[in-house]
Image (spheres, grey):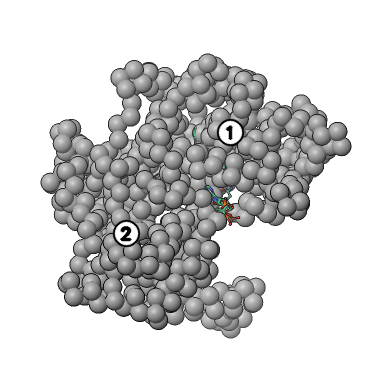
Amino acid sequence: MFRSVARISSALKQNKLQNHLFQKWSECAVVTQTRNVSEESKSFGLNLFRGQAHGEQVFPFPEVLNEEQRDNLQMFADQTAKFFEEQNDALKNDLLETVEPETMEGLKALGAFGLQVPVELDGLGLTNTQYARLVEIVGAHDLGVGIVLGAHQSIGFKGILLFGNDEQKQKYLPKLAAGENIAAFCLTEPASGSDAGSIKTRAVLSDDGKHYILNGSKIWISNGGLAEIFTVFAQTPVTDKNGDTKDKVTAFIVERSYGGVTNGAPEKKMGIKCSNTAEVYFEDVKIPVENVLGGEGGGFKVAMNILNNGRFGMVAALAGTMRYCVHKAVDHAGSRVQFGKSIHTFGTIQEKIAQMAIRHYVAESMAYMISANMDQGFKDFQIEAAIGKIYASEGAWYCADEAIQILGGMGFMRDCGIERVMRDLRIFRIFEGTNDILRLFVALTGIQYAGKHLKDVQKALKNPIGNIGTVVGFAGKMAKRKLGASTGVDLHNDSNVNPELQDAAKKASKAIEHFGGTIDQLLIKYGKNIMHEQMVLNRVAEAAIDIYGMVCVLSRASRSLSTNVASASTESAMCQTFCEEASVRVETNLNIAVSDRNMKTFRTLSTISDEVIKHGGCVQEHPLGF
Ligand code: MYA
């Protein structure tokens, strides 16, 4: 073992290998410098890309509510559940394609429009964890209403909460919290969806320097037809210190009352029908200069941070939806008799119910891990929030689909309720960052972080004697990876992991090491070109999602075992099963990511796609020849 370490260490000092690595790592460092992460982060998700298991964020499972917060939350949660059970009618909202005025008034009375607005500005002042619990209840009952509330506060006025100055907060937040004014987030445009930086809406400073004049249009704006206050992103000419002027995105608070703000008719949608979605047009809108949010030219970061900050709400809401789907499936499976037996006794149904319950357990654990991390003040949670959004939106889709399958024909009927849930759910894999874009975001942000680390090694290699610790440490890691030995990730020895979960933790440790080794390999193999290998990046993201899921449930199930809660043994079983299955998926995905054979398949897939595109559809003749 030590000889291998020495061999690799000396190989690293040889010019050829060194130059190759220098070049590759420099390329990676350059390409990834544009993504915004701390130099040394405490994020579990980011450090995973360095093959490290940073436990600070994830172990033990965080408990962030004090007694008073817990009691208040219990009260709000009971009131919210009662409201949704007794006063809100999700099927009626869906049919009418609107939330009726009395329901809106009831939500306002609950304080549901200002959940996180500070108490002194007339909101409920909830923490992220408290907010998560309430939106989970909303998500279990009516995703359409959830979007009305979420588009308002999760993204509509979140910019004012995060980036607003005191005057802006005092001016806008009280009325927004009361639901007297509704807010909307205006980013997407006809030619600018995932590529948020390419928006065309423009604002230019008036001659007297007192206003910006805003022109442009936005599409698919949730609450677009209801809102009085808009967070609008527009290009503005910004002159840098060298005197060069370039368009950069700036965020503005825009009031409908300024004039020149109009909207289109409500869109006809597949789901979340009761929420209002509309085009919004801005024509020579005069925005006072005081209404810039987060500084001129700082709008892209404002947008990204609002989205990063809002995603955990979606994870929690969808965990609520999954819980609902599990209950619907269980209700039916427990009472339906076929072939002389209750259908829940059949293996086919058991497997479905168990898989639904496991996915829900994972998503719920992610939701409360992320919200707690945000409450604890961790700055980097963007990878985890993106992972949570992907996992929960796909997990909820799976649960709704399997619940309908278990219910059979009954599930297909409108009155059953899940048909609406399934339609409502479809958009969650698309908006707030499509899952496809978020997978690339997870992979590239993580790879950038790993690239920074390799840059330190690169620096050390320029003076290996003076930096012998860094060089030998890195060389040792590479050697161990080559030999298939552990590089020291030992979740299974962490005192926070319950002994009953040792095997599952070993699988997670192995997956983390495999992951770190794969990232190094990819960096060396592709350099900056890794950013163009989306099929590879998707496998990397998939593995990251599974590993984060494993760690979240290991942490949570360990807490449940150590506190001996009634569900501990089922939680332990769900955790172990998830870790078992996820570790197999991780291995498969990581092997695919580096395999030349699979690269050939990826290239063939690109060629097939090119052909299909060239033909404007399917290439082959119909089997009947006409
Ligand atoms: S709203 C519309 C949603 N739209 C999107 O999500 C757009 C998706 N696109 C993007 O996110 C970006 O364009 C991507 C980057 C990621 C593709 N955090 O060169 P870059 C920094 C922090 O990589 P691009 C909706 O759907 C980066 O470091 N910083 O950028 C309604 C760099 O900084 P610097 C970030 O390649 C939903 C700079 O930006 C991030 O152009 C309704 C440029 O980076 C980041 N994430 O694109 C939902 N990304 O220059 C309702 C980049 O300093 C809510 N950067 O190095 C429902 C709530 C649930 C229910 C609640 C019930 C109550």
Picture quadrant of residue 267 = top right
> Of 504 and 109, which appears nearest the observer?
504
Residue at 62% from the left image edge and 20% from the top image edge = 170
Numbered mark located on residue 163 in the image: 1
Q: Position of residue 150 (x, y in %)?
A: 53, 34
Image: 214 above or below 429: above
Picture quadrant of residue 538 = bottom left
Image: 258 above or below 327: above
Numbered mark located on residue 51 in the image: 2
- Establish whether ligand 1 lies closer than 8 Å to the Cβ of label 1: no
How far, Cα to Cα, is label 1 from label 2? 34 Å
Question: What crowding class fits label 2: few (fewer than 14 Cα within 10 Å), some (14-19), or many (20 or more)?
Answer: many
Residue kind at label 2, given as amino acid type: Gly
Q: Position of residue 23 (x, y in %)?
A: 47, 73
Residue kind at label 1, given as amino acid type: Phe
> Of 581 and 481, which appears nearest the observer?
481
* Quadrant assignment for the N terminus: bottom left
Of callouts 1 and 2, the N-terminal one: 2
Residue at 29% from the left image edge and 58% from the top image edge = 512
Residue at 44% from the left image edge and 50% from the top image edge = 39
Q: Position of residue 624 (x, y in %)?
A: 55, 81
* Quadrant assignment for the C terminus: bottom right
Residue 465 appears in view: yes
Numbered mark located on residue 308 in the image: none
Image: 164 above or below 189: above
Question: What crowding class fits label 1: few (fewer than 14 Cα within 10 Å), some (14-19), or many (20 or more)?
Answer: some
Report whether 142 appears left or right of 568: right
Residue at 19% from the left image edge and 47% from the top image edge = 494
Specify the farthest residue to the left: 499
Residue 454 appears in view: no
